[in-house]
Amino acid sequence: MQNIIELTSSLINERGMLSTPDIAKEIKEENLLKLSTPELLATICMDLQMDGRFICIDRKWDFKINYTMQEVIREQYKNTAIIDIFEEEEEDLDIELNVDNKIDIEDDNVIDLSKIEELN
């Protein structure tokens, strides 16, 4: 039986980007099939995130190697709690995601994502 990482790798190679439920439908491992659907989906996401070779874009998994460093960083910011901060009006920090690839955290700290791209 293939583990989640091996299964996802082969599925992406065959079909391209896949959603977490699409991956779950292909699991044959008995121990994983004993999990409830939410537990199985959470396990898939956790395993793929921890492995580090995968990225979730628009709710579909793909290999990070297919994206530039700038795209990977942007997606990781989207998938972290930083997005929650954008949505909270009472938040103390003044955080703004600029179209020009900069992330302003408070007034003085600016991360320029374009500089990271140049290292690629």
Image: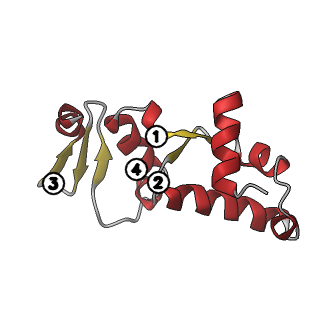
Q: Identify the mark at residue 107; answer none if there is no mark.
A: 3
At x 21%, y 40%, the residue is 116
Q: Amino acid at mark 2?
A: Gly
Left or right: 65 in relation to 63: left
At x 63%, y 43%, the residue is 9
**Mark 2 to mark 4: distance in Å?**
15 Å
At x 37%, y 65%, the residue is 91
Is residue 68 in sight in this rendering? Answer: yes
Which sits earlier in the primary sequence, circle 4 or circle 1?
1
**Residue 115: percent from the left, percent from the top?**
16, 37
**Residue 5: percent from the left, percent from the top?**
63, 53
**Residue 78: percent from the left, percent from the top?**
46, 47
> Between residues 108 and 48, which one lies in front from this camera angle?
48
Q: Quadrant of the C terminus?
A: top left
Is residue 17 in sight in this rendering? Answer: no
SS state under label 1: helix
Is the C-beta separation of discs 4 and 1 under 8 Å? no
Q: Which residue is mark 2?
A: 52
Q: Identify the mark at residue 64; answer none if there is no mark.
A: 1
Disc 4: CA contacts within 10 A as few (<14), some (14-19) or many (>=20): some
Q: Which residue is mark 4?
A: 77
Q: Amino acid at mark 3?
A: Asp
Which sits earlier in the primary sequence, circle 2 or circle 4?
2
Left or right: 102 in relation to 13: left
Disc 1: CA contacts within 10 A as few (<14), some (14-19) or many (>=20): some
Residue 81, above or below 24: below
Q: Quadrant of the N terminus?
A: bottom right
Which sits earlier in the primary sequence, circle 3 or circle 1?
1
Q: Amino acid at mark 4?
A: Tyr
The image shows a total of numbered marks equal to 4
Which sits earlier in the primary sequence, circle 2 or circle 1?
2
**Residue 25: percent from the left, percent from the top?**
84, 48
